[in-house]
Every structure is written in structure tokens, then in C-alpha cells.
Amino acid sequence: MDQMIAYCGLDCIQCPAYVATQADDREALEKTAAMWREQFNAPEITADSIICDGCPTTDGRLSGYCSICEIRACAVGRGVETCAPCAEYDGCGKLAAFHQHSPEAKVTLDGLRAAL
């Protein structure tokens, strides 16, 4: 599998938390948690809180943020694989706000949308 596109357009396979989880690499989880604590000014992030099997999973483990993500909850509720086919894609404030910080995710979704 070359990609696992999250509802928002991020590629889970590129996420260090996902990679460390799948490799059962506790040291990598600890390093990622430490990096994210500093990067996001979030002292509550721990290695255990970022264990993740990927956003699209329906029966796997989700990292702390992914488990409460409004974009994910909306897409799951609408029954779409990603936000790309959603009728409200162009006017979605949640996506627009997220994509300001992760423009690569928007590029991915725009490409999926164009292919529809």
C-alpha cells in the first residue's frame, strides 16, 4: 500500500506516529511525542496518546487528535472515503482552516476531486 489518505487529505503512511505504531517501535513513538509536544505546544501528548492505525480505520486505534477530529467525524457521518466527493467541499470551513496548516493535504484532495 503506497498511500492511506485520511478524510482531510493527509497521507497516514507518511505520519511518524502511524509508522512507529505499525513497526511497534516504542522509541520512535516517544521521539514523535516529544517532537509534537514542542511543535504544537501540547505538553499532554504522550507516546501512548499517538498510537494510531490510520484515520480511515474503522476498528483500529486512533491517535488522540484523530479520535476527536471534526473533519473525520463529519466524513464518517456522511459515509465518504475522503472529503473530496462531498458536495460541501468547496465551502467547508473546517477543511479550509485545516488546509491553511497542511496545504499538501488540500493538494491531495483537490487531485482526488478532479479525478471524480
Image (spheres, helix red, strand yellow):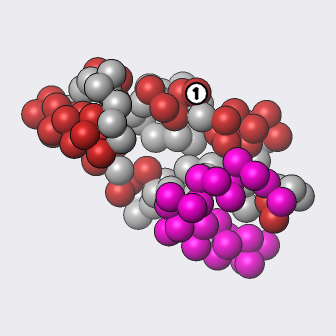
Q: Amino acid at mark 1?
A: Ile
Left or right of 79 on screen, residue 45: left
Residue 107 is a magenta residue: yes
Asked whether 58 falls inside the magenta stretch, the response is: no
- Residue range (magenta): 91-116
Which residue is farthest right? 87
Compared to residue 4, the image places residue 55 above or below, namely above
Residue at horizontal 86%, vertical 56%? 88
Residue that protrudes farthest toward the left in the picture: 27
Q: Return the x and y of residue 107 as percentages of the image width and height.
A: 58, 73
Chief secondary structure of the magenta portion: helix
Q: Residue at x 44, y 26 (%)?
A: 64
Q: Position of residue 30 (x, y in %)?
A: 16, 31
Comparing 12 with 38, the one in front is: 38
Return the x and y of residue 32 as percentages of the image width and height.
Answer: 22, 40
Q: Can residue 13 be seen in this snapshot?
A: yes
Q: Is residue 98 above or below residue 2?
A: above
Q: Quadrant of residue 76?
A: top right
Circle 1: element type: helix
Residue 21: in sight, yes or no? no
**Of the pair 82 and 46, the residue shown nearer to us:** 46
The residue tagged 1 is 68
Q: Quadrant of residue 106?
A: bottom right
Specify whether 105 is left or right of 109: left
Q: Residue at x 75, y 38 (%)?
A: 74
